[in-house]
Amino acid sequence: MMRAVTSASNFHRRFLCPGSERLEAGLSDEDSKDAKEGQLLHLYDADPKLERLILKPESRDLLRISDELDKVVFARVEEHFNIEKTSFEEVREKELWIHKGNEPIIPGHSDRLRYYVGQKVLVIIDKKFGRKVVDPASTNYQLRIYAVAGQELYDSDHVVVAITQPRLPYEERITMAMYTPEDIVKARLEIFSVLSAARKPDAPLHAGEQQCRYCKARTICPEFKRVIDVGLAVVPSLNGELTVAARQEQIERTLAGCSDTQLDKVLTAIQFAGYISDPARDEARKRKTENSNSLPEWKLGKASEYRVITDAPRAISLLSLRGPLTKDEILDCSKPSLTKLRSKIREKTGASYKEAEHLIEDAIGSVMEVETKRAPLIRQ
């Protein structure tokens, strides 16, 4: 689906990399699995009358927490502005636009908007159902655009913007910021300045984790490619005649001899390459399928097929009856998922997340062990 090239959701990318607008123009969006889950949650959040029992327990939890966070936001606003009579206008999933004169310039889509008529206070809530921590409301360009666009629709003395993230720890789930009319004027000037810089024919490209991660133009961006090339150049070409173990040893020696600056470039190159690995492979498969002469250095292998057990209890019963494995021996070959066990308990008993977790711990805690994953390496 084609959308506006620059919108509230990608405006921070324009600030960090002005040339990204030029490269992304004309490219279509591709929704990931996480994005589709977010769309589903936003759909149910927008209409509280929709039956939520058909959703997974975790999804129902997120929607319930999101509703509670909304109440906290409104309560804080009402307390701050001494709002006793809750006379307000409210709308969910409201499209907002910043205009220049009569021309709509930048679109946005707020999740929940409430206007306290008597106090002329506008509240805009943006809900983030993902796991990634986003910039707080005070520095978030998406919320800044919502504030400016909301002021165009409502004659407000104050605009309060809030971000809620129900997956985060309790104390990190809400961030809020307030804009006065003077703040709105400054924010509008800043937004137009960023947009003007992005629309220059020679707008520069700046590669970086925040702007490149979700940029649609990664695969065609010369700056993105340059960062990868610089990092990989640190590691010399490997001798193809070496054994796997010898090549591994050569790589380890090379990396051990790198300076911090060199290793930083290698890590950045690996990170950036990861952003395009799956899309690049998918594009290659598509081209080879449509034209076998495309990408002559590559060939398309045969798609692998594998079988899955769709009815585990019945499979265990049938296999134990047939032999030679006993039921316990069959179960020993499988590894139950704690997430699936928790969900199944909740579906069957109506228990809360914590109650299901306690039941599992109480029942099988003696046969569980804690495994430690390697610490993630996060660029500052």
Image (cartoon, rainbow, N blue to C red):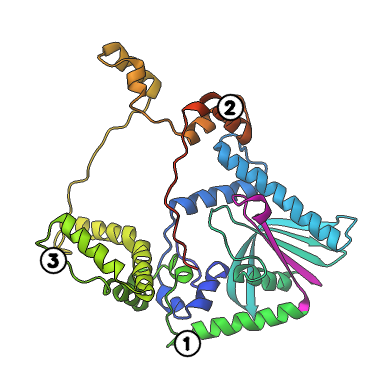
Which of the labelled discs sits on residue 359, or is there none? 2
Q: Residue under circle 3? A: 239
The mark found on residue 200 in the picture is: 1
**Which amino acid type corresponds to the residue marked 1 in the rendered image?**
Lys
Q: Residue at x 44, y 34 (%)?
A: 337
Establish if 336 lies above or below 108: above
- Which one is closest to the eye, mark 3 or mark 1? 3
Magenta-span inclusion, residue 14:
no
Give the SS element for disc 1.
loop
Q: What stretch is highlighted in magenta?
A: 157-181
The three-letter amino acid code for the residue at tag 3 is Asn
Q: Which amino acid does label 2 sit on?
A: Leu
Q: Which residue is drawn at 16% across and 60% down?
A: 298
Where residue 125 sits: x, y (%)? 68, 59
Q: Position of residue 235 (x, y in %)?
A: 25, 70
Eyeballing the image, is 57 above or below 247? above
